Amino acid sequence: LHSFPNDALPILNKQGKKKFSLSAKRLTHYPKEKLARLQEATLVQYQRDGITIHTSADKARYPDSGRELYMESNVRIIRKKNERVLSDIRSNSTHVLLQ
């Protein structure tokens, strides 16, 4: 069991540009379960043409594979282009594939 407060994890693409950034108030890794649990998680995905997708939730699960993220409780997904809000969605949960 490993626990890290206020951690941020930037992931880069092959060209060295930010693909996404994952942060949380607390990140706790469970090696036996092969996943991390996050409290107050925020995922920012960086897309082409200046589009970003900001997804936040009270809690999340991040499997060690790094390919997906399960976000739960008070989920909010905001899609922006150059800081202009294009959409704002609220949900109880979401499953994000990190490609």
Image (cartoon, rainbow, N blue to C red):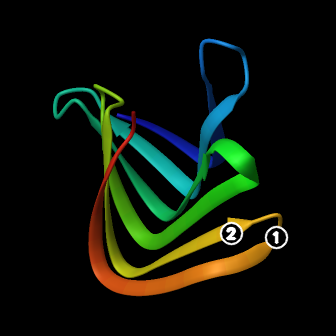
In the picture shown, does residue 38 fall above or below 20? below
Identify the disc placed on residue 58. Answer: none
**Residue corresponding to mark 1:** 83
Residue at 36% over, 30% down:
66
Whether label 2 touches label 1, CB < 8 Å: yes
Query: How many neighbours does mark 2 have within 10 angstroms: few (below 14), some (14-19), or many (20 or more)?
Result: some
Q: Nearer the viewer, residue 30 or 82?
A: 82
Task: Residue at 63% x, 78% y: name it.
Answer: 86
Residue underneath mark 2? 80
The kind of residue on which mark 2 rests is Lys
Q: Residue furthest top?
A: 14
Depth check, front residue: 74 or 31: 74
Number of marks drawn: 2
**Quadrant housing residue 14:** top right
Question: Disc 1 on helix, strand or loop?
Answer: loop
Kind of residue at disc 1: Glu
State the CA–CA distance, disc 2 to disc 1.
5 Å
Measured as percent of width and height from the top left, residue 23 is found at 61, 51
- Which quadrant: the N terminus? top left
Q: Tell me residue 81's x, y (percent).
A: 73, 65
Neighbour class for label 1 at 10 Å: few (<14), some, many (≥20)? few
Examine the rendered structure and indicate whether residue 77 appears above or below residue 67: below
- Residue 40 position, x and y percent, is 52, 68
Question: SS class of the residue under badge 2?
Answer: strand
Q: Is residue 15 above or below residue 12?
A: above
Look at the picture and state if 71 lies above or below 27. below
> For the view shown, which residue lies furthest in the right direction?
82
Looking at the image, which residue is at 33% across and 84% down?
Answer: 91
- Relative to residue 1, is residue 4 drawn left or right? right
Which quadrant of the figure contains the C terminus?
top left
